[in-house]
Image (cartoon, grey):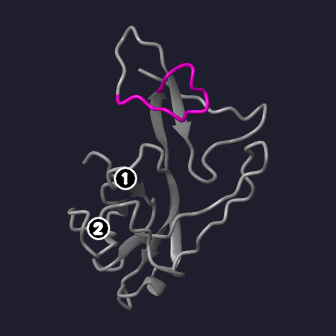
Amino acid sequence: ALGACGLDIPGAHGGLGSARATWTAPFSTTYDAIGKNLPVMSVACGTGPPAQDVFCSSDGSCMGTDFSVSAPFDAEIRLPEVLPLPTAQQVSTVAVCYCTGLRGCTTNGRYVQQVGIIQLFSATPAPPSDLDCTTTFAGVLAPVFFVVCAQCPPGGCAYGPKKTGRIRLP
């Protein structure tokens, strides 16, 4: 489905059909005076409720309350769709957490094993005169010049003269 993420866990074996996965609250970071991000503050699995403003609830309605998904025996965890972005600049980094299901996956404290990190980026077109990316276009036409503004989640973009990000447009 559009907006859905899959996380393959090679060699993993589910908890007899009752294993589940969820995600953490968003990671955070701060930035220094020149825009370099300082160390990312990660969120450990099993320490609190999942972010409810990143992925839809598992019922697909984006309005439910079950923020966990089945972790089937074939070891591919299929996360729900991402929520529609209220603003194009919303980005996030979350950890994906696993519960074996052997003692039930009824509380957030049972999802203690981190099995991955998901980073959600955002890119929007902007006028070429707006290099600070404060204005965005809803779309562009072929003869119109534009720049692409990439918004990076915490820990998502390298910083420095030799660590440059690249965007490839088809």
Q: In this view, does 93 lie above or below 139?
A: below
Identify which residue is drawn at 39% across, 68% down.
Answer: 52
Q: In this view, does 86 lie to the left or right of 64?
A: right
Q: Which residue is drawn at 73% across and 44% down?
A: 35
> Up-down: is 57 above or below 89?
below
Count of numbered labels shown in the rendering:
2
Q: Which residue lies furthest to the top in this view?
A: 143
- Does residue 127 appear to the left or right of 43 in the view shown? left
Q: Earlier in the sequence, mark 1 or mark 2?
A: 1
> Does the magenta portion include 131?
yes
Q: Position of residue 3 (x, y in %)?
A: 32, 48
Q: Residues within 10 Å of mark 2 (few under 14, many from 20)?
A: many
Q: Secondary structure beneath disc 1?
A: loop
Q: Mark 2 points at which residue?
A: 57
Secondary structure of the residue carrying tag 2 is loop
The label on residue 150 is none
Residue 140: x %, y % from top left: 37, 20
Question: If the image is split into quadrants, where does the C terminus sit?
Answer: top left
The dominant secondary structure in magenta is loop
In the figure, 167 relative to 58: above or below? above
Comparing labels 1 and 2, the label whose residue is closer to the camera: 2
Please give left or right for residue 33 compared with residue 41 in the image.
right
| Most foreground residue, 123 or 158 | 123
Give the residue at mark 1.
Answer: 5
Q: What stretch is highlighted in magenta?
A: 126-138
Q: Can residue 47 be seen in this view?
A: yes
Tell me, yes or no, if residue 13 can be seen here: no
Q: What is the x, y in percent for residue 109?
A: 48, 86
Foreground residue among 19 and 25: 25
**Residue shown at the point (34%, 72%) measured from the top left:** 67
Amino acid of disc 2: Ser
